Amino acid sequence: QVQLVESGGGLVQPGGSLKLSCTSSANISSAYILAWYRRPPGKGRELILQNIAGTPTDVTNSVKTRFTFSRDNAKNTFYLHMKGVLPEDTAVYYCYVKLLKPWDAPNYWGQGTQVTVSS
């Protein structure tokens, strides 16, 4: 069973920056998908950014110029760099890993970390 441990959430002022981390118990160097999702209050979970077979893919236009993805394979960790945060970025953020490509390969989720943007 692969475990994902998230960290880095918290309270941040509008316009500020935050870095979320997701550390995997498994080797992620050849993972098929690494991704970040979020669930705003009262809304469904949405995909923010994902990396498919090593190729970054922006999904949500609202974060395209503000959020970036990076990874450190040596640490089995990937990151969500958030800058210029807005109140509407308030959400629980989840990391997601799919190690293998087949549609029925297991999906793994982090426990979620709360990000609150408020002055």
Image: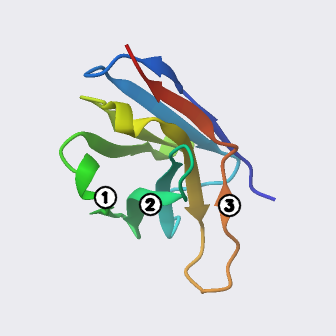
**Looking at this rendering, what residue extends furthest in the top direction?**
119
Q: Secondary structure at mark 2?
A: strand
Confirm or deny contact between disc 1 and disc 3 (CB under 8 A).
no
Q: Please name the amino acid that badge 2 sits on.
A: Leu
- Identify residue for label 1: 60
Label 3 element class: strand
Give 52 or 116, whichever is nearer the viewer: 116
Quadrant location of the C terminus in the rendered image: top left
The span from disc 1 to disc 2 (Cα, nearest Å) is 7 Å
Q: Secondary structure at mark 1?
A: loop
Most distant residue in the right direction = 1
Left or right: residue 31 versus residue 5 is left
Residue on which disc 3 sits? 108
Question: Label 2, label 3: how many angstroms apart (C-alpha)?
Answer: 14 Å
Report which quarter residue 66 is drawn in. top left
Q: Which tag, 1 or 3, sits closer to the chain's start?
A: 1
Identity, as a three-letter code, of the amino acid under mark 3 = Tyr
The residue sitting at 48% across, 33% down in the picture is: 20
- Residue 32 higher or lower than 44, as above or below: below
